[in-house]
Amino acid sequence: MTACGGGGGGDSTNTPAPLPVSSINAGSDQAAAEKSVITLAGQATPSGGEFVWSQVSGPLLSNFPLTGATQSVTLPSVKLTTQLVFDLKYTTPAKEILMDSVTVTVNSVNQLPIVSIKQTAPAQLPSKYNDTIILSSDGSKDPDTDGVIVGYKWLQTAGEPLEITDLTNKDLTFTHPLLEQDSQVQFSLTITDDEGGKSTNYHDLILRKTTQVIAADAGDAQTVGEFATVNLDASASKALTDSYSCYWQQVSGTLVNLIDAEQCQSRFIVPDIDIAEQLIFEVTITDDNSRTATAQTQINLQPLPLGLNNDSGMNKCYSNSAAISCGNADFPGQDAELGRDVVADYLDKVGAGTLAFDFTKLDEFADELPDTATNFSCVRDNVTGLIWEVKQANIGIIPNTQLREGQNSYSWFYTGEGNGGVPGFAAAAKSSCPSDVDCGIETYVAQVNAANFCGANNWRIPSYNELMGLMDLAKQGNGPLIDTEYFPNLPNSNTLGHLRYWTKETSADGQSLNFAWILDFQTGNDLAYPKTSTAYLRLVRTP
């Protein structure tokens, strides 16, 4: 700038104006409650530039970045105290960039749960004895937008104590007790939310007395198999006196032997049955004041599928090296643990025999004899219904023997069905038997039928399974594997070196059909045996 003066001359100096100072201020740090609205207000010099807000940390908010010095921000919902950091960027008119930041502390504000209790069962009110009562908390809620209820705690706070099994469910469930007078009870429910907030409410309930002051409970119906032990339990009965007594009796069905019938817990063993049936039992409850009540329960009986064949006779269990008690978990599923023999003590036998075997002695006309008879001609197997030949005493010397002596032996010659197309070989007459025809099995069958032995003429050679039904494996190592009380007059095992008996089945083993199956009553083995060899024979017939 230039200026003019009067008179005399002199020097003058021009001083430039000072430049404006650049500065920025994002405002002071602040704190506020969750979901509230705050203001971010920034200042900067020189004026005329551009403000931009951006979020640096904390729960992500929408719409950032925002342009402008002042912004209204809605804080997020939080479970815990949380910090948000915002940066403020200012670009001056001269394109200089200035930065500052501000921290906003967001405080969690927990709204406590609202506790609602409502009785929802039984549908018919007022409730009575043995009704299921339900107090529901369905109307309860956490008023926080993202709140969650995490715990329920019920307590009985007044009245006679009730039997309640679970106090931590959403609903409280219990059974209306037996009452001589009305009873007022009270329950509290404390609900906890996911921020640890707790609220409690109370519910009062009147439980009505009943005209019934003693209640009998015979237990649920049961379905069991024959020979099972059935437990009858009336211990769920109720009485208002200190104690009560029980008496069980059978109302219908096959009569059983009730054990401890004068106890609240009685039992019986299901008898041998042939078809399904139902038994009804009644219990009478008597309290200390001689008041009584009765209840019944039904037991459905099912016959076991024991089949129509004999069991093996095996009654012992074994490890790899020795006899052990049955039921050992390391050696499960043994023969002695399965089948008809296991329940032998409970079988309703027609005759007698070891374990589950059931035989009846018959005379020469096939009429029944007592089990003690010593003179008998044939034996009926009461399990299979088959009638078996009993051999004559071994009094001769082969071939000068009686027709049916146990020591006679035969080759396999059979022209009937199942011979595999190879009838076999008939041993010579009077070689191993007394027959003048031959010593083949077919000739023996014909001669026994011709004699009308034991009042019948339909004797035949047994099948493999039929003959196996006579074998008693429990006798292994202790003599012949058959009950000699019912099947006496066995041959001496030294005569042929075995006790092998023919079956009618040709063996398909190997490359030829010249073998038939035998069962060895000395060892328990089966064997495909040459039809040309001799073995023993016991005939059978179907009545």
Image (spheres, grey):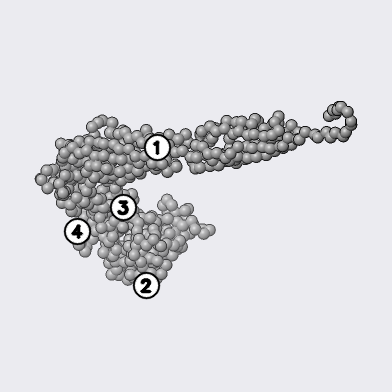
Quadrant where the image shows the N terminus? top right
Where is residue 372? Give x, y as percent: 20, 62
In the rendered image, which residue does mark 3 sit on? Answer: 384
Where is residue 438? Give x, y as percent: 39, 62
Is 419 placed above or below 121 here?
below
At 46% from the left edge and 60% from the top edge, which residue is drawn?
A: 515
In the rendered image, which residue does mark 4 sit on? Answer: 370
Q: Secondary structure at mark 4?
A: loop
For marks 1 and 2, give the one nearer the viewer.
1
Q: Residues at badges 2 and 3 in contact (C-beta under 8 Å)?
A: no
For marks 2 and 3, give the one nearer the viewer.
3
Q: Is residue 75 left or right of residue 196?
A: right
For marks 1 and 4, give the one nearer the viewer.
1
In the rendered image, which residue does mark 2 sit on? Answer: 494
Choose between 321 and 189: the one closer to the eye.
Answer: 189
Sequence-wise first label, 4 or 2: 4
At 35% from the left edge and 56% from the top edge, which residue is drawn?
A: 338
Q: Residues within 10 Å of mark 2 (few under 14, many from 20)?
A: few
Amino acid type shown at disc 3: Thr
Q: Residues at badges 1 and 2 in contact (C-beta under 8 Å)?
A: no
Quadrant of res 131: top left
Q: Residues within 10 Å of mark 1 (few under 14, many from 20)?
A: many
Q: CA distance from mark 4 to mark 3?
A: 19 Å
Q: Secondary structure at mark 3?
A: loop
For marks 3 and 1, give the one nearer the viewer.
1
In the rendered image, which residue does mark 1 sit on? Answer: 113
Number of on-image labels: 4
Q: Secondary structure at mark 1?
A: loop
